[in-house]
């Protein structure tokens, strides 16, 4: 049976339409892509075709939208703390400290941040580089910038920054980068704006590599803390004891606003000797045996610039102290 010419024509049309639809995935870009590309081109002079090719190659990932909706910080302290204060995480930190001691000491002298805090942040972020994330950074930032309205402005800015970063600040080509579901990269999980502003080429090889250069990784974390106001040799947090007449005070403010002596007048005393003039704020955490009260200081606030959660900063402080104690113990046993 011969095929009617009209049918043949329509089949040809279908093929043509199908081809157009194929091309069209490039034209029907992510919502907001054209505007973003325009801004990056304006700010950097980069090629729009190259930028569009990068963004067209990135896909919206439902798993990223699912992950950002259930952060670990939503847990109470009594459930959050055991995630990080494990023997394995402490021992991993001791081993990292011992392996990189010369580098950590040099960086501590340069940036004024005690080594155990740099190690603890890398430990909490990625278990010392073991879990750096397996999402393509472009997929993560495209998904959150274009398909996650609650935080779209933040992630759009991060995506724009990523597209504008010079190659010397990245571990490889843009479409090869991997990281967390939020688009954070490397052992210290730096967002693009943090790479731009705080990452350091500590080994002076002309590029910043937060995946493979221990020097760059350690110095970048220390520089981040230093740049946000870290105080050399100052405490991070101290347990507080409310007395029977303790007044209700403004809890859980991250910025230290009142001197310790003021808190003492309100009925909250530190359990260790501290400068009564030191500015503090007071956190109430849900511990395994009921409420825990903690004075937190400037350096605690600085750690919350890394991650806004007070639970995160508390975990970093306690892990840092456990690592420092373990290293000191090993030194003493030699
Ligand atoms: Ca480098």
Image (cartoon, rainbow, N blue to C red):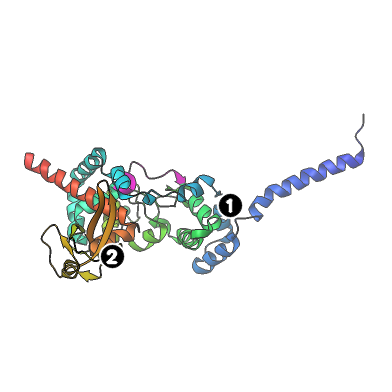
**What residue do we see at 30% from left, 50% from top?**
77
Any mark on residue 325, and which? none
From the Cβ of disc 2, is ligand 1 less than 8 Å away? no
Between residue 166 and residue 226, name the one nearer to us. 226
In the rendered view, does 197 fall on the left or right side of 96? right
Circle 2 residue? 227
Instruction: Tell me if I can see residue 143 in this picture.
Output: yes
- What are the residue bounds of the magenta stretch? 124-135
Q: Position of residue 79 (x, y in %)?
A: 32, 45
**What residue do we see at 82% from left, 43% from top?**
12
**In which quadrant will I find the C terminus?**
top left
* Dot 1 crowding, Cα within 10 Å, few <14, some 14–19, many 20+: some
Please name the predominant secondary structure of the magenta segment in the image.
Answer: loop
Q: Where is residue 57 in the image (x, y as percent from the top left)?
A: 56, 49
Between residue 134 and residue 276, name the one nearer to us. 276
**What residue do we see at 54% from left, 46% from top?**
62
Q: Is mark 1 on a helix, strand or loop?
A: helix
Circle 1 residue? 56
* Dot 2 crowding, Cα within 10 Å, few <14, some 14–19, many 20+: few
> Which circle's residue, 2 or 1, is located before the other in the chain?
1
């Amino acid at each position: 049976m011969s095929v009617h010419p009209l049918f043949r024509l329509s089949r040809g049309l279908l093929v043509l339409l199908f081809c157009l639809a194929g091309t069209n995935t490039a034209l029907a870009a992510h919502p907001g892509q054209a505007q973003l590309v325009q801004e990056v081109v304006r700010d950097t002079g980069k090629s729009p075709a190259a930028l569009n090719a990068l963004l067209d190659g990135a896909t919206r990932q439902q798993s990223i939208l699912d992950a950002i909706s259930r952060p670990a910080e939503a847990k109470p302290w009594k459930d959050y703390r055991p995630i990080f204060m494990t023997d394995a995480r402490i021992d991993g930190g001791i081993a990292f400290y011992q392996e990189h001691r010369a580098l950590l000491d040099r960086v501590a002298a340069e940036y004024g941040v005690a080594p155990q805090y740099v190690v603890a942040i890398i430990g909490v972020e990625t278990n010392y580089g073991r879990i750096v994330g397996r999402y393509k950074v472009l997929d993560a930032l495209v998904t959150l910038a274009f398909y996650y309205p609650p935080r779209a402005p933040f992630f759009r800015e991060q995506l724009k920054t990523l597209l504008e970063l010079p190659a010397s600040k990245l571990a490889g080509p843009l479409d090869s980068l991997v990281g967390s579901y939020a688009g954070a990269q490397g052992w210290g999980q730096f967002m693009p704006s943090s790479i731009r502003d705080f990452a350091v080429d500590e080994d002076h090889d002309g590029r910043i590599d937060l995946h493979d250069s221990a020097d760059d990784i350690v110095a970048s974390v220390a520089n981040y803390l230093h740049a946000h106001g870290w105080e050399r040799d100052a405490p991070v947090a101290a347990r507080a004891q409310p007395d029977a007449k303790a007044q209700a005070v403004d809890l859980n403010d991250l910025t230290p606003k009142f001197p310790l002596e003021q808190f003492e007048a309100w009925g909250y005393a530190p359990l260790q000797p501290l400068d009564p003039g030191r500015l503090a704020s007071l956190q109430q955490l849900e511990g395994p045996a009921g409420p825990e009260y903690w004075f937190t200081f400037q350096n605690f606030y600085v750690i919350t610039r890394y991650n806004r959660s007070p639970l995160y900063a508390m975990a970093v402080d306690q892990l840092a102290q456990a690592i420092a104690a373990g290293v000191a113990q090993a030194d003493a046993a030699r």
